[in-house]
């Protein structure tokens, strides 16, 4: 189903960062909620039908979170590798759901698991996108101590994406914590420097620093029905993080 035209798109190639927790459903539990997975895939399929080239990085926090394991006494590198494998599980689930929506999808992983996914090769990923495939990047950067936010920023720059999308549980970036401060204001735009200086959260600072150094804009918005398409069409949704105020 076509929901827009390629000529009206503000972003024609994007990387979307989805949290693993988002796939677990509204109760914030663990595992994968199949209804949420199906709805997410349907949303992404609609965006793909507009002509947007889509790369996806999905976290693994709904299955295993490395930092949590490390804080419980596990070796940090070991727990991070377990987290990477969790992202592969989510990536394969998302691939299956997207293909059920009729969208050709490739999973590429930073850790070689040849029986279930392709190894990540930058030029091959770009070729998949040019052919109209959605590409899901699994296993983070392939290295411990780096978040999936950082992996998303890295992949976005490598494939020359127009923007990095961060779909979250909140409407965007606020000047203060909206949970503790009811009068917190949603920011429509914020510079990279302010984001880092004010510790505004929402995204890993290493990822934001990478985007700042390479001039890659970030769009932070709530993962709600229709929002990804609205952002691709230039709609005023969420917060824009860029060089300009």
Image: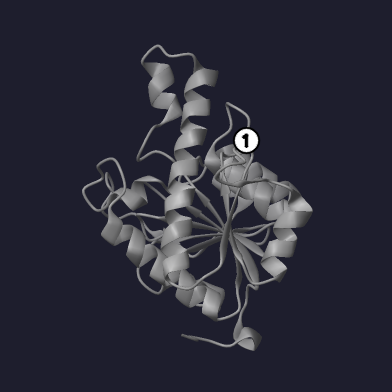
Q: Is residue 124 left or right of residue 76?
A: right
Q: What residue do we see at 50% from left, 42% from top?
A: 88
Callout count: 1
Q: Position of residue 137 (x, y in %)?
A: 59, 49
Q: Residues within 10 Å of mark 1 (few under 14, many from 20)?
A: many
Residue 172 position (above or below residue 145): below
Residue 125 at x, y percent in the picture: 70, 56
Residue at the location (55% across, 81% down)? 50
Q: Secondary structure at mark 1?
A: loop
**Image position, residue 158 (x, y; %):** 74, 52
| Residue named by callout 1 | 111
Tell me if I can see residue 193 in this picture.
no
Tell me the quarter of the picture where residue 54 sits: bottom right
Foreground: 220 or 110? 110
Q: Is residue 220 visible?
A: yes
Figure quadrant of the C terminus: bottom right
Identify which residue, 227 or 175, lies in the foreground.
Answer: 227
Compared to 69, does 242 lie above or below? below
Give the left or right position of residue 34, taking residue 167 as reference.
left
Instruction: Locate residue 2 relative to residue 208 in the image: left or right.
Output: left
Q: Residue at x 69, y 63 (%)?
A: 128
Residue occupying the far right of the picture: 123
Nearest to the observer: residue 49 or residue 92:
92
Q: Seen from this angle, which residue lies furthest front?
A: 115
Comparing 49 with 186, the one in front is 49
Q: Is residue 45 left or right of residue 29?
A: right
Measured as percent of width and height from the top left, residue 45 is found at: 47, 72
Identified at 69% across, 71% down, the residue is 131
Q: Residue furthest left?
A: 27
């Amino acid at each position: 189903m076509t929901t827009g035209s390629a000529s009206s798109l503000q972003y024609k190639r994007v990387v979307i960062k989805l949290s693993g927790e988002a796939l677990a459903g509204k109760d914030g539990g663990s595992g994968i909620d199949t209804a949420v997975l199906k709805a997410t895939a349907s949303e992404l399929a609609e965006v793909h039908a507009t002509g947007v080239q889509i790369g996806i990085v999905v976290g693994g926090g709904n299955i295993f979170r490395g930092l949590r394991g490390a804080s419980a006494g596990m070796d940090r590198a070991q727990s991070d590798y377990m987290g990477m494998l969790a992202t592969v599980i989510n990536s394969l689930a998302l691939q299956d759901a997207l293909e059920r929506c009729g969208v050709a999808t490739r999973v590429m992983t930073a850790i070689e698991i040849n029986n279930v996914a392709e190894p990540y090769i930058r030029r091959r990923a770009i070729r998949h996108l040019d052919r109209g495939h959605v590409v899901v990047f699994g296993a983070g950067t392939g290295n411990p101590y780096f978040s999936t936010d950082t992996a998303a920023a890295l992949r976005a720059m490598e494939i020359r994406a127009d923007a990095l999308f961060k779909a979250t549980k909140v409407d965007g970036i606020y000047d203060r914590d909206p949970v503790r401060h009811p009068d917190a204001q949603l920011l429509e735009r914020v510079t990279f420097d302010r984001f880092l200086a004010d510790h505004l959260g929402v995204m890993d600072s290493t990822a934001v620093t990478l985007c700042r150094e390479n001039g890659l804009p970030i769009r932070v918005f709530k993962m709600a029905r229709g929002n990804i398409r609205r952002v691709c069409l230039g709609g005023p949704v969420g917060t824009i993080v860029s060089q300009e105020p």
